Amino acid sequence: MTSENQDDKDLINYRLSRIDDTLEAMAKNLERLTTLELRHATTREEIDKVVKAVNSHDHRIKAVEIEMPMLKTIKGWVVGAVLFMVAMVGAAVIKMILNA
């Protein structure tokens, strides 16, 4: 019976050590999971900030797109006016050269 009791104690000690090892591994994994969850929360917050910034820019871009046809028209007028002025100055220079 003594041998049997010793075997039982050894088995219990082995199982307790295995349980202890398992608990240590679980504690490490839980710590790692907690760290990952914190990183995920931080990443999620940053993504939310970026989405808000993009939405803000989206509204600004839409406002510019609405004004774009008018800006293109005005640009055309300005370029036309500048070209007209250059042509007039060129014509005046040519007339002065021919009259001289």
Image (spheres, grey):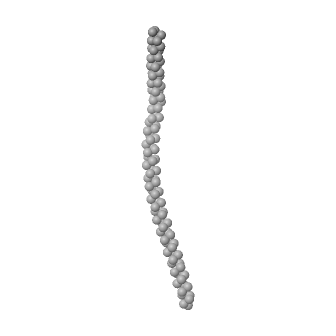
Along the line of sight, which residue is nearer the eye, 58 or 16? 16
Whether 44 is drawn above or below 11: the answer is above
Residue at 44 percent of width and 53 percent of height? 45
Percent across and percent down for residue 31 are: 46, 65
- Vertical position of residue 2 compared to residue 30: above or below: below
Q: How many labels, in total? A: 0
Q: Is residue 13 visible?
A: yes
The answer to which image quadrant residue 6 occupies is bottom right
Q: Residue furthest bottom?
A: 1
- Give the quarter of the figure containing the C terminus: top left
Which residue of the protein is positioned furthest toward the front in this rendering? 100
Q: Residue at x 48, y 63 (%)?
A: 33
Residue 78 x, y percent position in the rendering: 45, 24
Most extreme residue toward the top, as rendered?
A: 99
Identify which residue is drawn at 45% across, 32% down: 67
Residue 54 to residue 84: above or below: below
Between 42 and 82, which is closer to the camera in this rendering?
82
Residue 64, quarter of picture: top left
Q: Position of residue 55 (x, y in %)?
A: 45, 43
Quadrant of the snapshot with the N terminus? bottom right
Task: Evaluate whether residue 88 shows in this view.
Answer: no
State the image coordinates of residue 75 (x, y, percent, origin top left): 46, 27
Residue at position x 45%, y 14% in the image: 92
Residue 45 position (above or below residue 77): below
